[in-house]
Amino acid sequence: MQPKRCSWCGDDPLYVRYHDTEWGVPVRDDRELLEHLILDGAQAGLSWITILRKREGYRRAFDGFDPARVARYDGRKIAALLRDPGIVRNRLKVRAAVANCRAWLEVMDGKGGSRFAEWLWSFVGGQPIVNRRRTLADLPAETDESRAMSKALKARGFRFVGPTICYAFMQAVGMVNDHVTTCFRHREVQTL
């Protein structure tokens, strides 16, 4: 018998694996958080499965999300990225990824607080918020925490980090546990 899951992942094997092993698991690694933030920004206006299918393409195209390397991308490199079918070829989103790596380096240099992970996690008091949503209809698009994160990120030069994107990011990296209560992962993620 199949375990009960959040219905958003459907039955696509890639989506199910992502739901069952990654979504909502607390992430505290600085570079992994940067990758998630860039990918969530790339997802704006698209379905997450589109980005999930291109994730390896993004990792390859953006040098493993090495912020120091990406921050040095020039117009020629950006033009090459815009021809790469392994990523979403949207000029604003590609430029945002480069800008976000530059902003990340500034935050890591102490201009935005301490380590990136500590700074981001401070928006939820350092611990995951455990929600008890019964249905997907109960999930908000944004929260006070995601609005505060969005405002702070934008103030530091980050792009494609509106409150809805920030909330999706917070869900993905386990800052909030938004698995519905009937999903087998709700309890599992809560214990991580």
Image: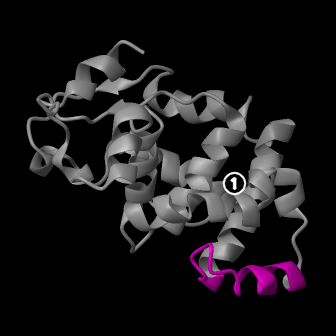
Q: Within the image, what quadrant is residue 63 found in?
A: bottom right
Q: Is residue 166 visible?
A: yes
- The quarter in which the C terminus is drawn is top left
| Rendered location of residue 75, percent (x, y) | 86, 84
187 relative to 31, above or below: above
Left or right of 178? Residue 167 is: right
Quarter placement of the N terminus = top left
- Which residue lies under the disc numbered 1? 156
Quarter of the image where one finds residue 47: bottom left
Where on the picture, by quarter, is residue 103? bottom right
Q: In this view, does 95 lie to the left or right of 47?
A: right
Amino acid type at image mark 1: Arg
Which residue occupies the foreground of this view, 42 or 52?
Answer: 52
Residue 157 visible? no
Q: Is mark 1 on a helix, strand or loop?
A: loop
Residue 180 on the magenta segment:
no
Judging depth in this view, the residue of 100 and 188 nearest the camera is: 188
Coloring basis for residues: one colour
Relative height, residue 96 to residue 173 (above, below): below
Q: Which span of residues is magenta-colored?
A: 76-91
